[in-house]
Amino acid sequence: MINTTTATLYVVGNINVDLIMGTLDQWPQRGTEVMVKHSELRPGGSAGNCALALEAMQVRHRAIANQGDDGLSQWLASHFPHSAAHWPRSQCETSLTVGVTHSDHERSFISNYGHIVQLTAQQVLDQLPQQATEGDIVLLCGTFLCLHLYGDYPALLTELRQRGYLIAVDTGWPPQGWTEEVRQDIARWLPLCDWLLLNEVETLGLAAQSQLPTSATQLARQLSGRGGCVVKCGEQGARCWLRDQQLSQPARPVTVVDTIGAGDSFNAGFLTALLHQQDVTAALQWGIAVAALAISTAPRRYPNWQQLQFSAKEQ
């Protein structure tokens, strides 16, 4: 396949600095210090990870975000040269996440507030064309971390639909937990959403159910009907519930190095396939191919366009 589509994938949300450190299996006692063998400073956040994968794959995209005004702002923006020129500047520190990895491949995060909480719906809309080109997709990431934007989701999604965009959302995990208030907030705009991209625990939490098929089916029926509920299942692969069918794709075996951003990498591959009019089965394959390379390399690598085609065919 030749990468000739005129459609664009717009990635909206939390682009921040990630400081990844590990491996640590026991938190230090207060007042003490521990040393770890690995550390890496890199662009991150759900939207940032996805945009980096799209850049590597040479996919038509733009990262829609804002930026702070401290010493890290220019460094972060330099990694997104095709997008950062459009980012409004907020008079605050850059958002930073410290990710601590553990030997079981799980991870823990500590984040400040920083610039991402100040991103507004108007700032997002100002960076998007007034009318979508056929096939354009908007992916909203870091829902609960972009605090100002989160409150405007119903109005934002309504405007995106009016402009003709296909809408995908990866909410992430709410810091306050899956409270009934959070579920009610999401229920207000879920019918405006076409694709919901979650992991297993997020799917169960949002649906307030104990079984994955029941949860994903319930959520798929609340969506617009133009897409479905995609569930990222880690080493078990990925599954997708549409209104009238359920699809699944196994993961490929890899030696895991770093799982941070695995779901964001999957999003990049999955939505790239949709951007190129591939069916859902192929989209699941593309998502898994991108995530598999991302989590098994250090420094992190993503497939380029030719490698993506080859990798997806291997599955």
Image (spheres, rainbow, N blue to C red):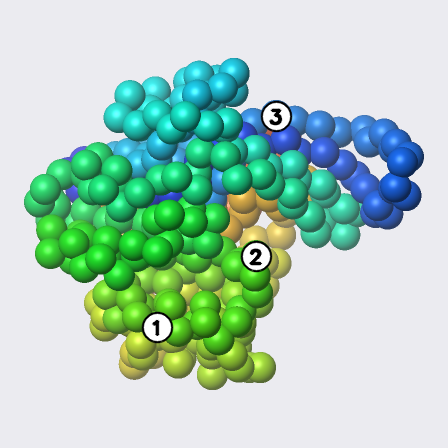
The CA span between labels 1 and 2 is 18 Å
Q: Earlier in the sequence, mark 2 or mark 3?
A: 3
Q: Which residue is found at the position 37% from the left and 48% from the top?
A: 148
The numbered mark at residue 187 is: 1
In this rendering, the answer to whether 230 lies above or below 152 is below
The CA span between labels 2 and 3 is 23 Å
User: Within 10 angstroms of label 3, few (less than 14), some, or many (20 or more) residues?
Assistant: few
Residue 121 visible in the shown view: yes
In the picture of the structure, the residue carrying the numbered disc 3 is 41
**Tags 1 and 2 touching, CB below 8 Å:** no
User: Mark 2 is on which residue type?
Assistant: Pro
Q: Seen in the image, is 307 located left or right of residue 98?
A: left
Viewer-nearest of discs 2 and 3: 2
Q: Name the foreground residue: 117 vs 234.
A: 117
Element marked by disc 2: loop
Q: Earlier in the sequence, mark 1 or mark 3?
A: 3
- The spot of residue 283 in percent (x, y) is 35, 55
User: Mark 3 is on which residue type?
Assistant: Leu
- The spot of residue 182 in percent (x, y) is 45, 68
User: Mark 1 is on which residue type?
Assistant: Ala
Q: Name the foreground residue: 8 vs 247.
A: 8
The CA span between labels 1 and 3 is 37 Å
User: Within 10 angstroms of label 2, few (less than 14), some, or many (20 or more) residues?
Assistant: few
In the picture of the structure, the residue carrying the numbered disc 2 is 175
**Tags 1 and 3 touching, CB below 8 Å:** no
Q: Which residue is found at the position 46% from the left and 61% from the top?
A: 198
The numbered mark at residue 25 is: none
